[in-house]
Amino acid sequence: MGQSTGKNLPQKSRNQPPQLHPHDEELSKSFATTTKMEALIAWGRKNALWPLPYGTACCGIELMSVMGPKYDLARFGAEVVRFSPRQSDLLLVAGTITEKMAPILVRIYRQMLEPKYVLSMGACASSGGFYRAYHVLQGADKCIPVDVYVPGCPPTPEAVLDGVMLLQRMISENHPRPWKDNWKAPDYV
Amino acid sequence: MSNLEALKTDLGQQRDISKFQFSHAFGDDVMVIPKDDLIPILRHLKDTDKFDFLMDVCGVDWPNREKRFDAVYHLYNSKNANRLRIKVPLAEGEAVDTATTVWKGADWFEREAYDMFGIIFKGHPNLRRILTHHQFVGHPLRKDYEADRQQHCTETLPIHFDNEPGVEGDVLNPALVPLNIGPSHPAMHGTLRVMVELDGETIVRSACEIGYLHRCFEKMAETHPYNQVIPYTDRLNYCSAPMNNVGYCKAVEKLLGVEIPPKAQAMRVILCELSRIIDHIISVGTGGVDLGALTAFFHLFTYREKVYNLFEKLCGARLTVALTRVGGMAQDAPEGWFDEVLTFCREMRVEVDEISKLMLDNKIFIQRTQGVLPVKAADAIAWGYTGPLLRASGVGLDLRKAKPYYGYDALDFAVPVGTNGDIYDRYLVRVEEMRQSIKIIEQVCKNVPGGDFTIRDRGVVLPEKKDVYGNIEGLMNHFMLVIKGLRPPPGETYDATEAANGELGFYLISDGSANPYRLKVRPPCFAIYQSFPQVVKGGFIADAIATVASMNVIAGELDR
């Protein structure tokens, strides 16, 4: 198709950059901008986070409020909730991770595609919280690398939004993430 | 003649009761019997209609006793609200016959007692671990197991089913399609895992695996002073946290023998009913989401936020409030709070009508739910259903009417009852209960009694800050209560309240120290959810998803 129509067009040299008319140049500045590829990608990533709500406990209920009408995570470009790890890039660990749950959390994390980020919501996911108990993992970071910790039991929706904004800043600044780069899956999984 | 005397006479005609011990303490009837008499006695009590519900089965550990364990059975009669506690002492390694032959609802409760204490129930169809993971060694609620000794789980169990007689549950049928749903799945509300074997879209058999949110509530309660347990109760049913606070504090107060002042009672009733509304909001809202109706969820969450605001004004927290204290409330309501509650009631009344139209009158919703996987009243009772699900099956049992507390008997409200026990009726009952709760709140808010919001017993409640910093008696009182702790007399009690999901019971044992010796929670959805494999058998997989949603299983109280 391209060949048949191409014959009728005036031939252009492939090696010469196109010369713009001064009027066109003025026009292109009004809608175009120059930037580094890296920054452009980071800008796209940070404003289109697709969260996987790994809500296991009370924080999961508060996460509903974050998504709900008043706080509305959509304002930060993160409203497309996906329960499939293949489709999401932000793992929201909302709630207690028990010993029984840990292998599943690791499996979900591994199934996510790069680039991927983890936000741990609440005291339990960050440190085990006040459950210093025989069946509770003392923090999700015992088995997966966590980028942002949001304190609270459960955190207020404002705090979660603040955590998401912090993550967005990290993405746009290309903040180094040694905890993720050096992460090894726990040998027991 | 008291209930216990009547029981003694009746049982004396049946069996040799010379080894039985009868006692009555803290308002509860207790009977201690040898293990061989248990099943005949249970069957007799059930067949003669003395007790129709087996509410709870649990274990207790007494390491210094010759017979180390107690298997404890709580029975309930829905007609006259009588309760009976049967205790069976057992030595280590000694087995007791399973009660599943009498009440099928004993199934998961016995598995839990096995998991937590290692009590063996002879003849139980599927005596595996239920809350802890399958690689766990030891029995964590025994007194010699340290509370913080963690054991890592290295793998998940493959698909498995309950063991039926003659069939090993782990052997799959090659002609059928096995399917695993959860624990990380949008339809599984947090941490539930359902495994099914499908013939086309029809469920041939299914099983639930729970325990993914087992946070060791009962062990935590044993290692914390009485008032510090209250924040842990928040996180049982986190959709309606204040109700758990109230249920727990009521049990401790029963053991202490104190009556809370009228104002505290009124505040507790208001909080309970507000919680019932927001719990039903979650249930109805997410139930709609599971059927593909997103609108109602966003609609209802606006109103949940309004209740959060009311809680926030009262205590500063939104979800996990820890509002009550043993002896009353943590603090008084701020000025104008009751008027704001009334304003909310007016708005909510309109919203409930709207939701009723949006969901219950919706053609698609009706087709998906009406007549789908109904549960008959007799089955519901045998499984130990309580709350909206039991009432949807046509049994009008509500503890607020059956055994009124906190002045519920003086309030004008109705108990909605369904007819079919299908999914539609469950939502119908819940929506109507929201209306009744609004009615209750309005009545209480218009007549809030004056007076104090807590008792002022020096051995129970901390003095006010102005006394602690203002005079030496207050300072000493504060110091002694913090150091020594609140100490109920040795004894045990079972106390239940009507929570949003049904009967929320607390079985509390005190040995006179500052921590509970044993605190067993009887979570309503634990009894309900164990019936799931039977209820969905032969149904469509899509209807099973609707059933999970309508059961309103809250992982926090299911796994504790």
Image: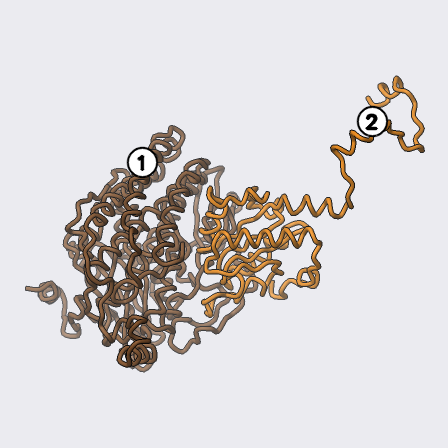
The answer to which image quadrant residue B38 occupies is bottom left
Residue at the image point whose x is 60% and y is 45% from the top: A50
User: Does dot 2 land on a helix, a strand or a loop?
Assistant: helix
Residues flagged by tags 2 and 1 on a common chain: no
Is B285 drawn above or below residue B34 in the view shown?
A: above
In three-dimensional space, the C-alpha distance between marks 2 and 1, rounded to whole angstroms, equals: 61 Å
Q: Is residue B539 visible?
A: no
Shown colour of chain A = orange
Residue B266, position as x, y percentages in the image? 22, 55
Q: Amino acid at mark 2?
A: His
Residue at the image point whose x is 69% and y is 57% from the top: A175
Which image quarter holds the N terminus of chain B?
A: bottom left
Which image quarter holds the C terminus of chain B?
A: bottom left
Q: Is residue B402 left or right of residue B464?
A: left
What is the letter of the brown chain?
A: B
Q: Residues within 10 Å of mark 2 (few under 14, many from 20)?
A: few
Residue A56, position as x, y percentages in the image? 48, 55
The residue wearing badge 1 is B350
The residue wearing badge 2 is A23
The answer to which image quadrant residue B393 occupies is top left
